[in-house]
Amino acid sequence: MNLTDVWLFGYGSLVWRPDFPFDEVRVATIAGWSRRFWQGSTDHRGVPGSPGRVVTLVEDPEAVCIGRAYLVDNANRAMVLRKLDFREKGGYSLRNIEVTFPENGGTKAGALVYIAGPDNSEWLGAALPDEIAEQISGSSGPSGNNDEYVKRLAGALRDIGAQDTHVFEIAALVSSLSSRRGEG
């Protein structure tokens, strides 16, 4: 790694669908943030007037969020950030954050992360888990069904050993709603 390479931290769809070139991927954590289905999606998993729900990070001093960090070399940095700026355009902004690599002796590094806060037009905020699951189950957009996003995220988090009560609860509720509707 040289000084112009950059780590990108993914905690949502980037955990299971990084669609950019990277040199290395590691399991990583960030302290002080929780993953929540509080961000609306009218550009990927919903449409205007019927938004889906996707995850963002919310400040939570006691929390540790696990995801994946991708090392992008300087030659690809500008292209990758342009692509991600477009992908994350629905209310997300780029921030600097410190990540920890648990499998690498707890080493730390600076990283970039996209976070959508309550000041953006797509923000939906907190809701009861049943309400979130119901909205997700009825949403679909250009990137597919919202329930697919939830199931893929929950599976990818399990694959890396994450314990995320919120995501797993929403995934179980969405799965139950799908079963009751005969969607499998």
Image (tube, rainbow, N blue to C red):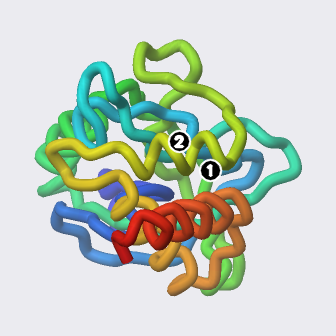
Query: Do the residues bearing badges 1 and 2 touch, measured as CB atoms within 8 Å?
Result: yes
Residue at x 56%, y 68% (from the top left corner): 176
- Of all residues shown, which one is farthest toward the right? 62
Q: Is residue 128 above or below residue 8?
A: above
Q: Which residue is mark 1?
A: 35
Q: CA distance from mark 1 to mark 2?
A: 6 Å
Q: Earlier in the sequence, mark 1 or mark 2?
A: 1
Residue 83 visible in the snapshot: yes
Residue 69 visible in the snapshot: no
User: How far from the left and from the top, in percent, is residue 150?
Assistant: 45, 61
98 lies left or right of 17: right
170 lies left or right of 181: right
Residue at x 42%, y 22% (from the top left corner): 122
Q: Nearer the viewer, residue 152 or 8?
A: 152
Residue 75 lies in quadrant = bottom left
User: How far from the left and from the top, in percent, is residue 161?
Assistant: 63, 84
Residue 13 lies in quadrant = bottom left
User: How far from the left and from the top, in percent, is residue 46?
Assistant: 29, 37
Q: Nearer the viewer, residue 80 or 117?
A: 117
Name the amino acid, label 2.
Answer: Thr
User: How far from the left and from the top, in percent, is residue 163?
Assistant: 71, 73
Image quadrant occupied by the N terminus: bottom left
Please state the total of marks drawn on the protein image: 2
Q: Is residue 106 above or below residue 61?
A: below
Name the amino acid, label 1.
Answer: Arg
Residue at x 16%, y 38% (from the top left corner): 82
140 lies left or right of 161: left
Image quadrant occupied by the C terminus: bottom left
Q: Which residue is mark 2?
A: 56
